[in-house]
Image: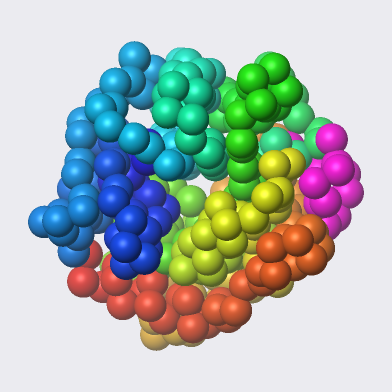
């Protein structure tokens, strides 16, 4: 698994180990952290390797599945590292596909709702082709994932590779970095430290937030299925950013004030998954409500901060 020390990767590692699998995790620790793996670091079936997946990957022995999660998913990080982001999506996907071919393994790719860009259709089904600017300020991330999906389809058609593609919508939970820059860790950090909570735009833009354990259940369901086309994984419970800020203030009993800054260029105004495909073909839907997920996330950030 690439990106194994990251927010989502560390949760997936723990789940797979709990199911009795052996897990080899790779990470460059640009955004991944050793502390995310503290609970499993000395597990008999776990091994961690520091490796850049844009370089040749050698793994001895057999592999059942190659999972490519490595990416700089936060705008704060991918806009600082646009070339690295593009290389992980292009070269990293190519190298991990080659490994899957060598091992005759199933290939799992973590794509993103960002392939839909600033959508003109809401909610977004997998059939929606998106509204993406290939030369825009977010393009390094969007296009890295769109290219990755295209490359995977080519390997599937030309080589018969068994593939899975998860289009991940906004996900949150413990092990997110306090400096991640995405809205939930930013709001929680600001509320807990008593600093102003920054809402970009007027707060009417919407997002749909999926708790990390629900996402991991979706990953497992997709891996256990025969679905080789992209599948949306996210929580369709859409809400405004203003409402989210007010919820975090209430749950943290914070005295922080909400302030407003200009909306970043091309920041999507809506984001909501159509999960009909996941429900019908995987038997999956999210179960953790936002307040329950936020309660655990806030507790985690209280300990970290």
State whether residue 210 is above or below residue 85. below
Nearest to the observer: residue 38 or residue 72 = 38
- Which residues fall within the magenta stretch? 117-129
Residue at the spot 36% in from the left edge and 23% down from the top edge: 53
Q: Residue furthest left?
A: 42
Residue 104 visible? The answer is yes
For this view, does 109 lie left or right of residue 126?
left
State whether residue 112 is above or below residue 49. below
Residue at the spot 45% in from the left edge and 41% down from the top edge: 65
Is most of the magenta stretch helix, strand or loop?
loop
State whether residue 52 is above or below residue 195. above
Residue 138 visible? The answer is no
x, y (%) of residue 151?
64, 21
Q: Quadrant of the N terminus?
A: top left
| Residue 241 belongs to magenta span | no
x, y (%) of residue 217?
53, 66
Query: How many labels, in total?
Result: 0
x, y (%) of residue 34?
18, 48
Q: Could you say which quadrant of the image residue 279 lies in?
A: bottom right
Residue at the spot 38% in from the left edge and 50% down from the top edge: 9
Residue at the spot 52% in from the left edge and 82% down from the top edge: 291
For this view, does 184 lie left or right of residue 137?
left
| Residue 122 belongs to magenta span | yes
Nearest to the observer: residue 176 or residue 45 = 45
Nearest to the observer: residue 59 or residue 290 = 59
- Give the colour scheme shown: rainbow
Q: Quadrant of the C terminus?
A: bottom left
Nearest to the observer: residue 138 or residue 29 = 29
């Amino acid at each position: 698994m690439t990106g194994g020390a990251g927010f989502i990767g560390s949760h997936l590692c723990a789940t797979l180990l709990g199911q009795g699998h052996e897990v080899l995790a790779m990470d460059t620790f640009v955004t991944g952290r050793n502390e995310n793996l503290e609970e499993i670091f000395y597990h008999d079936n776990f091994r961690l390797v520091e490796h850049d997946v844009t370089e040749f990957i050698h793994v001895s022995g057999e592999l059942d599945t190659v999972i490519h999660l490595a990416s700089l998913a936060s705008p704060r990080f991918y806009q600082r590292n646009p070339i690295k982001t593009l290389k992980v999506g292009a070269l990293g996907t190519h190298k991990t596909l080659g490994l899957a071919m060598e091992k005759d393994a199933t290939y799992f790719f973590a794509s993103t709702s960002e392939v839909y860009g600033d959508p003109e259709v809401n909610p977004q089904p997998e059939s929606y082709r998106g509204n993406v600017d290939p030369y825009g300020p977010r393009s390094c991330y969007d296009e890295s994932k769109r290219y990755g999906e295209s490359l995977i389809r080519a390997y599937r058609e030309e080589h018969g590779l068994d593939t899975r593609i998860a289009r991940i919508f906004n996900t949150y939970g413990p092990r997110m970095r306090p400096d991640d820059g995405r809205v939930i860790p930013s709001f929680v950090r600001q509320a807990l430290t008593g600093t102003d909570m920054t809402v970009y735009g007027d707060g009417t833009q919407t997002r749909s937030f999926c708790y990390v354990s629900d996402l991991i259940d979706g990953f497992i369901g997709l891996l256990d299925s025969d679905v080789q086309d992209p599948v949306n994984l996210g929580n369709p419970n859409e809400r405004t950013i203003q409402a989210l800020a007010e919820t975090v203030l209430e749950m943290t009993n914070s005295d922080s004030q909400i302030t407003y800054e200009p909306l970043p260029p091309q920041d999507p105004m809506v984001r909501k998954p159509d999960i009909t495909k996941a429900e019908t073909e995987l038997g999956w839907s999210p179960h953790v409500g936002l307040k329950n997920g936020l309660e655990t996330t806030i507790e985690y950030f209280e300990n970290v901060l």
